Image: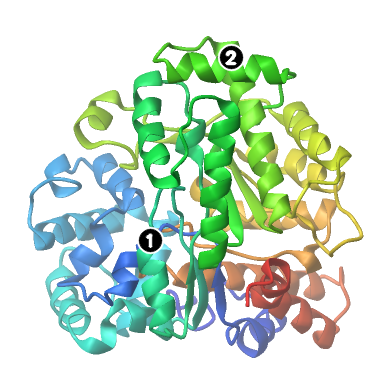
Amino acid sequence: MKKFMDKNFLLQTEIARNLYFEHAEKMPIFDYHCHLSAKAIADDIRFDNIGQAWLAGDHYKWRLMRANGIDEKFCTGNATDYEKFEKWAKTVPMSIRNPLYHWTHLELQRFFNINEILNPKTSKNIYDHCSRLLQSPEFSVRNLLIKMNVNYICTTDDPIDSLEYHKKIKKEGFQIKVLPTFRPDKAMSVDNSTNYNKYISRLREISGIDINDFSSLIKALDIRHKFFHEVGCRIADHGILTFYADDYSNDEIESITVKVLSGKELSEIEISKFKSAFLFEVAKLNHKRGWVQQFHVGAIRNLNSRLFNNLGPDIGCDSIGDRNYGEKMAKFLDRLDQSNELTKTILFNINPRDNEEVAAMIGNFQGGSSPGKMQYGPSWWFLDQIDGITKQINTLSNIGLLGRFIGMTTDSRSFLSFPRHEYFRRILCNLIGSDVENGEIPNDMNLLGEIVENICYNNAIRYFKIN
């Protein structure tokens, strides 16, 4: 019987172990999509304790705690950090086979050199030990990132953000590049005219543009797009329920925009047409400045209205949607490709049903301009576990080029989440190692080692071209 999460965790063959320890383990991390706080990095904060570092803002853990019958005050409420940690420690044993069980113990091992199992009996000692370390200068957030061999972090930022903390980090010469990502979802969210106009008021103020129609809206976004570029941004990100690719005329879109800006609610078809035009125009901006664009597709959000009304978004009440969007996705991409304005694009699906559809779609719009121009994004959110990662790698391998894949990203709000890259890398090496053992691919360690190193880091460096 193998020891729980020893050094050969998930590495079932000698080839897999060789690929991981000789190639994957040493590669730096390029985390091209996360939700970390640039302010926390700029201020180089230190956490008071492990409860604060682990449970503040982590909706993954909150979901499991609620499922374990933990009262909300221990998730998002006013309980002390230790009380919340105790409840998480009580939940961990029940999370066997959930990825958080592995992530929890990987983080304890890699950051704190703790090999104990977290449970109610060990929670106090683990809490005290980790908290003492986190309070020391060696465990400030910058040093946590350095400890994990992180080279690049791309945060998620609204067009109205000042990016002051990104500029501060760069000015101070921090060795890790912390760059913004342009995510204009709120500028597209015309579903509620009251909320939308509140946002547009802020966009008017910060852009200096009197936004009174669609043309001026895009002009304001272009100004912010250029500002982001000057601060170092090279990636746009869109979190969308589905793709939008309705036919429309310019006059229609101008009329729809004037209507919503006047405070009137739009019909479903008007909303869909507006979003079709919006995504298309922002995608052209992304091409104009040579950015990569990401589309995170399919999440249905804020489904528990009681918790949403009390706590707001991002509190663990989102799910996998089931929209059919293949034809619209194709039409959207083709519309850009017709004028040669389709920039490098990463497509993420949250419903595993859509794996083959998305992996096949990228093959329609590849081009000779760069290898792997169109990317099938790594397993995301509900899918970033052994089964989901394995299926994503297998699907990409079956339909596209695994050797051009740009690898994993954390999509996390936690500074302790970077062992997720290790988790992915071990799964990758194990899959390739098993294929070698089965005689399905050649035992060419030079070729396989290079492919593993490229997927872990080098392909992303070449793809994003961030200096």
Q: Which residue is mark 1?
A: 101
Pick the residue in front: 160 or 213: 213
Q: Is residue 86 something one can see in this rendering?
A: yes
> Is 49 located above or below residue 6 in the figure?
above
Query: Is 343 displayed left or right of 185 in the figure?
Result: right
Q: Residue type at mark 1?
A: Tyr
Q: Nearer the viewer, mark 2 or mark 1?
A: 2
Count the labels in the image.
2
Question: Looking at the image, which residue is at 29% across and 71% down?
Answer: 117
Q: CA distance from mark 2 to mark 1?
A: 52 Å
Q: Identify the disc placed on residue 169.
A: none
Rate crowding at label 2 as few (under 14), some (14 to 19) or many (20 or more) other CA atoms within 10 Å: some
User: Residue 409: percent from the left, percent from the top?
Assistant: 55, 63
Q: Is residue 322 something one can see in this rendering?
A: no
Pick the residue in front: 83 or 337: 337
> Is 233 located above or below residue 245 in the figure?
below
> Is 122 located above or below residue 207 in the figure?
below
Pick the residue in front: 413 or 220: 220
Q: Residue type at mark 2?
A: Ser
Question: Looking at the image, which residue is at 38% across and 57% down?
Answer: 162
